[in-house]
Amino acid sequence: MYYRRKLILGILEEFEGKLNHTNFQKILFLVTRNQEKKVFDFVPYKFGCFSFQANQDLLTLGKYGLVNSETKRESSNWILSEDSNFYSKLKKEDQSSIKKVKREVEHFSQKELVKHTYLNYPFYATKSQIAKDILSDVELATVKKQKRNIEGQEFFTIGYEGISLETYLNKLIINDVKLLCDVRKNSLSMKYGFSKSQLKNACESIGIKYLHIPELGIESDKRKKLVTMSDYNQLFEEYEKTTLMDNQDSIKELFQLVHKFKRVAITCFEKEACMCHRGRVLKSLTSLPEWSIPYKNL
């Protein structure tokens, strides 16, 4: 079993086997703040800090019969299905962190726990739908200072290779991206969070619009057996002469979207734009006579 899932089970054990969905996310967040290498990343969400990966892991643990989700009119809870003593299998520093967080928050109401995370980690309250109901005007001002509201136009490219969904989304948030354009031909991924429906739902849940433009993608079979930079360049040169030439309407549409949304990113898998066809999409855009917008790879 992945260590991060053992951590989830260990936290539930230490909190008497039951935690409200929202409270669990906050407690997991506080526990991971004490980790040198955090096993979960978080994003600002409608109720504060949230880990998509942790939520998915809980659903997976449910399929294994280790956790149940109980929904009642007043709350939804994660409940341990059996006593399995995963807490004892955790690293000593994580056991200590769980104990420390429990001492700090075990007598908090849900509202007090949420407020505690907002006050100590205001960036994660920037997308909250309830901050105005639980924070004072002075406290809200601190949260607002963490928000990114950038006026100028800018264009970005971003790959998800080697990073979590949460880290990827935070890059978009920090740069105040308004629209994410997926330029993969087939928007499927073995990596959690990056298949079309998952990525679309994640983006739109934090206020970023998502658009798939498959016409600008490359067929997956053409990407096989790419070893050297020469292999990549040969593929991308063919891509420029065929796909891009045949889909200039999509390039023009993308150009119009940049003017409409001001801050737009295109995405594919590879970390570096030079190893990805999105670099050639960018080249085609910047070759337009009307183009005068700054750009960078995230």
Image: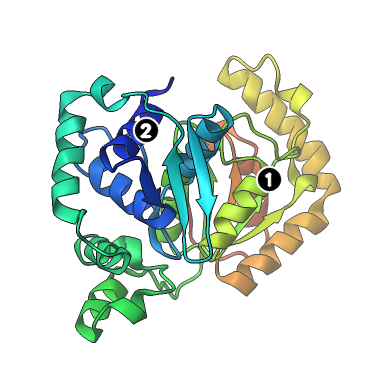
Q: Residue 196: which disc?
A: 1
Q: Is residue 270 left or right of residue 212?
A: left
Residue at the location (41% across, 69% down)?
128
Disc 2 crowd, CA 10 A, few/some/many (<14, 14-19, 20+): many
Quadrant containing the N terminus is top left
Disc 2 vs disc 1: Cβ atoms closer than 8 Å?
no
Q: Residue 83: which disc?
A: none
Q: Residue 32: which quarter of the image?
A: top left
Looking at the picture, how far across and down is residue 106, in whole percent? 21, 53
Residue at the location (22% across, 63% down)?
116
Marks counted in the figure total 2
Q: How much space separates mark 2 and mark 1, taking CA atoms?
A: 30 Å
Residue at the location (40% across, 57% down)?
22
SS at mark 1 in the image: helix
Amino acid type, label 2: Leu
Q: Residue 155 or 47: which is nearer the viewer?
A: 47
SS at mark 2 in the image: helix
Q: Is residue 34 positioned above or below 110 on the image?
A: above
Could one spot residue 290 in this view of the protein?
no
- The extreme bottom residue here reads 137
Q: Is residue 282 left or right of residue 151?
A: right
Could one spot residue 162 in this view of the protein?
yes
Looking at the picture, how far across and down is residue 13, in whole percent? 31, 35
Q: Residue 68 or 33: which is nearer the viewer?
A: 68
Q: Is residue 111 positioned above or below 287 on the image?
A: below
Residue bearing the label numbered 2:
9
Disc 1 crowd, CA 10 A, few/some/many (<14, 14-19, 20+): some
In this rendering, which labeled residue sits more in front, label 2 or label 1? 2
Amino acid type, label 1: Lys
